[in-house]
Image (tube, helix red, strand yellow):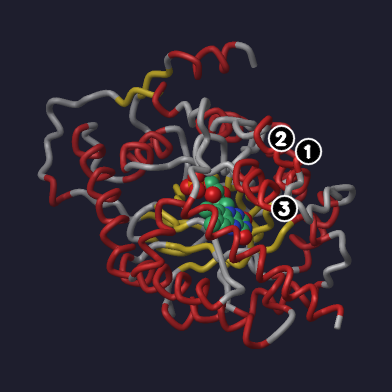
Amino acid sequence: MVIKKLKNHLEERKREGIEVTLKENVQAKNSTTLLEDIILIHNALPEMNFDELDISTNFLNHKFSAPFIIDAMTGGTKEAAKINANLASAAEELGIGMGLGSQRAGLNSINTAETYAIARKKAPSAFLIANIGGAQLIDGLSIKKIKKIIEMINADAIAIHLNPLQEMIQPEGEPKYKGVLDKISWISSEINVPVIVKETGCGISKEVAIKLEIAGVSAVNVAGLGGTSWAAVEHFRAKKRKMHNKAELGKLFWNWGIPTAVSLIEAKSSINIPIIASGGIRTGLDIAKCISLGASLVGTAQPLLSPAVKSSKEVITAIDKMIYEFKTSMFVTGSRTVSDLTNSRHIITGKLLEWQMTH
Ligand SMILES: Cc1cc2nc3c(=O)[nH]c(=O)nc-3n(C[C@H](O)[C@H](O)[C@H](O)COP(=O)(O)O)c2cc1C
């Protein structure tokens, strides 16, 4: 009875999360990623042909055709199964990675687990990342259950997501974060796939990045400010329930967080493990700027949701557009490979420079 109730609550939350993200404008409004403050240097003499570009890369011992992942979104409902199938088919065809949405719901029934497992069926060789919330780890989630989450999609890695702000605004939120770092450390030593820790749109500071590296995680996904705002999503969910104080809280913290470019620079300057840049990545030029700042992979979530509701072809078209923009950025910076781009020169201006100077 209790499990059934929890299952229904989780399903409703998942459904609403997708609905709100599709129907309302839940993007950061007065804040940006600050990637606009990065200037890549034009190279008028690239001394190569466009077809010589090699955008492949390696991440955690897996070869990617491009340094790109579809960031964690969904699972747990019938609609989510279709979305996951379309995203996974695209990831397989493009040779990129994909993160699944939080899999807690998948532990409750075989049918729900299928809404995640479909991703591995559609993407037998793509790099798939399992997902669970940091807040759930201290609810006594056992290693056995974490292994079950990994096995559900035969995952290449597991992401633990951190969302303290969302837990404060979410109508059913559970803002319990005491002991999460210890749990992350424990899981990193007990699990035999790489552990990635990610935020969900508020970024990771250098202090947190250092703690995570010491805890033994294999990679960090900064998921910074400038794209989807979960304070905004929860604002709309709270408003629907007439929870006025929570709705107001969502408005107040709509633009809260560390801009993606800042978070990436902070993490890169303080840790040695690979970094995924995400949060507000909307073009191939954004991808190029993140690679130039030292990201190993770059991820996008919300812009791929609407194409994924329709078909895998639509997802491929959307990602192909970004990849062509990325390749153009490589060509005009004279970067034949991804590591050439990482080593290329860039200029930091404006607010991003201010942020750097005050830290
Ligand atoms: C509909 C939707 C559902 C999401 N669900 C999850 C989730 O279950 N787990 C997670 O780690 N992140 C989740 N995210 C956060 C994304 O992975 C990403 O960190 C964030 O949306 C910022 O990227 P964006 O600006 O490209 O959307 C979700 C994002 C969206 C849009």
Query: Which residue is painted at 27% across and 23% down in the image?
Result: 41
Q: Quadrant of residue 192?
A: bottom right
Circle 3 residues within 10 Å: few <14, some 14–19, many ≥20: few
Query: Which residue is painted at 52% across and 35% down in the image?
Result: 28
Q: Nearer the viewer, residue 246 or 222?
A: 246
Residue placed furthest toward the bottom:
110
Residue at which label 2 appears: 248
Q: Amino acid at mark 3?
A: Arg
Q: Position of residue 191 (x, y in %)?
A: 73, 69
Q: Position of residue 318 (x, y in %)?
A: 30, 55
Measure the alpha-carbon separation of dots 3 and 2: 13 Å
Q: Amino acid at mark 2?
A: Glu
Assign the N terminus to one quadrant of the image.
Answer: bottom right
Q: Nearer the viewer, residue 184 or 23?
A: 23
Disc number at residue 52? Answer: none
Residue 72 seen by the camera: no
Look at the numbered discs 2 and 1 and tell me whether their residues touch, using CB distance below 8 Å. yes
Q: Position of residue 33 (x, y in %)?
A: 49, 31
Look at the numbered discs 3 and 1 and tell me whether their residues touch, using CB distance below 8 Å. no
Query: Which residue is painted at 35% across and 68% down in the image?
Result: 310
Q: Quadrant of residue 230?
A: top right
Residue at which label 1 appears: 245
Measure the alpha-carbon separation of dots 2 and 1: 5 Å
Q: Closer to us: mark 3 or mark 2? A: 3
Answer yes or no: disc 2 within 8 Å of ligand 1. no
Q: Quadrant of residue 289?
A: top left
Horizontal side of 309 relative to 190 (left or right) equals: left
Residue at which label 3 appears: 241
**Does residue 220 lie above or below 47 as drawn?**
below
Residue placed furthest toward the front:
242
- Provide the secondary structure element on which disc 2 rests: helix
